[in-house]
Image (cartoon, coloured by chain):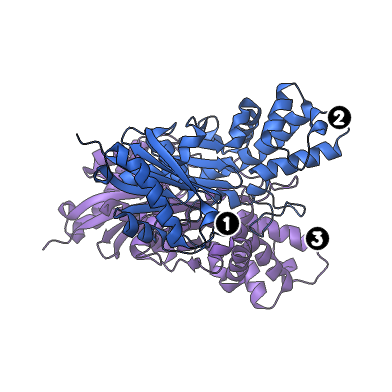
Chain colours: A purple, B blue
Amino acid sequence: MEKPYVLGLDMGGTNSVLGVVDARGHVLARTSVKTQAYPRIEDYIDALWMEADKVVTPLGGWDQVRGIGAGVPNGNYYTGRIEQAMNLPWPSVPFAQMMSQRFNLPCTITNDANAAAMGEMTYGVARGMKNFIMITLGTGVGSGIVIDGKVVYGHDGFAGELGHIIADRSANARPCNCGRKGCLEAYCSANGVARTAKEIVSTTTQPTLLRNVDMDHITSKDVFDAAEQGDDVAKKIFDFTGTMLGQCMADFIAFSAPEAIVLFGGLTKSGHWIKDPIVKAMNENVLSLWKDKVQVLFSDLKESDAAVLGASALAWE
Amino acid sequence: MEKPYVLGLDMGGTNSVLGVVDARGHVLARTSVKTQAYPRIEDYIDALWMEADKVVTPLGGWDQVRGIGAGVPNGNYYTGRIEQAMNLPWPSVPFAQMMSQRFNLPCTITNDANAAAMGEMTYGVARGMKNFIMITLGTGVGSGIVIDGKVVYGHDGFAGELGHIIADRSANARPCNCGRKGCLEAYCSANGVARTAKEIVSTTTQPTLLRNVDMDHITSKDVFDAAEQGDDVAKKIFDFTGTMLGQCMADFIAFSAPEAIVLFGGLTKSGHWIKDPIVKAMNENVLSLWKDKVQVLFSDLKESDAAVLGASALAWE
């Protein structure tokens, strides 16, 4: 009985999750290793292989496995290299080649957000779409751009850094982790939302449930809980965040005229509280020919599966 | 003797230029009609055919002609239609289909800036490049984006409106012809440069040769002439314009990671006066991974040929 599988690897700064995925997008088995536990890349790959072997064997063995797709911080699709990934123990290594040798399987890598875009196109809300933009709202803000059914890699493999589009060019724009100022990521990442919450709560005299929250660890979940209870300050935080994102999305549309923009990540769990201001700002700011024409979709893939599925989609290519 | 030709049509709001182009990009003959002289699209196309016949016949006749490519305001590559082109006597018509019927030849259309990108890729400074962005600086600011060797049309055929990216989100951003505020076009079009000149000249007490120029008809050529004579105010105008453009180009790079950005149009005749501030602002504002890595090129196609060549390149596809 022939049931081809692929392996999807979601490498994070802390955990690396490896899943066995079938052609219909079911994650049949999963396992993981601690990314930071292996100062040598060879040991990390050995550990991955041993964990994979434990789950592949009961599923019919390595003969069934067609390839490996990996979503990797700063992973370069063209070169197969991890390039200057500061959160990893091995910032620059020829990862795809090393994986391929150890596993004796073809291995394709890309960055996390491009993998997410592949996942949405193959198994998620962007199924059947040829032109869409994926934006991942997490610790950082990432993006994967799909044009004519293909992820855009650009001249060097690093296209789609929409988290570092300048959202605010004013003198008091926020500093970003990239060393510049005013990047979208400084406003719409988890940390950006926390910063907005602190700023708004500390400068308003309005009563708000958020004064009961530890401001050093506030998350969009806390803001969501307050908004659900009718808290106006919480709504203001979502309005500000959604407006920043929606304004930038209007510019993204002028670039590639997508059918939809797909959002993924913690912030999307705040549902309409964040979606309404995003859609409003996008349509108020977009060139009239696209007004009310571009869908804003929230990913419906299970968060625990999405990254593995996205990575695995690369392996089927 | 077989010498295949194509026709390239550059339709402007005032003039429509039709050229006969060979496979090596030589414009063998050209003719034109007045766009506004034909209230009925059928009459315009008849006039074009009659003019074309006069130049095609001496070159060997219609048997040699393989097709027609047209660069048309608001021309849609997918539908072949002109859509809401406010400067034309016939704002919405199925142009490609009508041309094809009258000429008995395949006809492909796109907008002016996409045609310019095709021209640069086929005959100009972008020969051999697979990933670049074309920006046309004229009455408006247009753009054509090339990814993996193909012009990006997006979901609806209207991708690449980079003239309408918001360059200034501040409260006193300039109104744009599109009805919004702060668009790149409001700063880097011919009119945008004239407006910058007026603003800077009227608010400075510095001596400047530009006080001798009729401010209602000032062009980048006037500013160039002054800069060449060491005029500091003229240099300031180029610095402001180039900085606005370079900042936006830094964002465009984060989108598609191009090998080069190619600029075309009147403003580029100001040479290093405009190029230096563009390159400086681009590299100061771009994410560090692209710093000093993306070429800024000025088109070297003859202005009179470029649009016709670009349009003709479509016909060879």
Q: Secondary structure at mark 3?
A: helix
Upstream in sequence: badge 1 or badge 2: 1
Of residues A157 and A36, the one nearer the viewer is A157
A269 or B290: which is nearer to us? B290
Name the element at disc 2: loop
Question: Mark 1 or mark 2, which is nearer to you?
Answer: 1
Residue B112 image point, x, y percent: 49, 48
Q: Residues within 10 Å of mark 2 (few under 14, many from 20)?
A: few
- What's the residue type where badge 2 is placed? Gln
Q: Which mark is residue B206?
A: 2
* Mark in the foreground, 2 or 3: 2
Name which residue lies at 62% across and 26% down. Answer: B272
**Where is residue A59 shown, x and y percent of the image?**
20, 60
Q: Chain of mark 3?
A: A
Residue kind at label 1, given as amino acid type: Asn
Q: Secondary structure at mark 1?
A: loop
The residue under label 3 is which amino acid type? Thr
Q: Chain of mark 2?
A: B
Q: Are marks 3 and 1 on the same chain?
A: no
User: What is the spatial separation of the Cα atoms under label 3 and label 1, in whole angstroms?
Assistant: 50 Å
Q: Nearer the viewer, residue B118 or A270?
A: B118
Residue lying at 31% horizontally and 44% vertically, measured from the top left = B316
Q: Where is residue B133? Give x, y as percent.
A: 48, 41
**Mark 3 — residue?**
A203
Q: Please indicate, yes or no, whether residue B159 appears anywhere in the rendered image.
A: yes
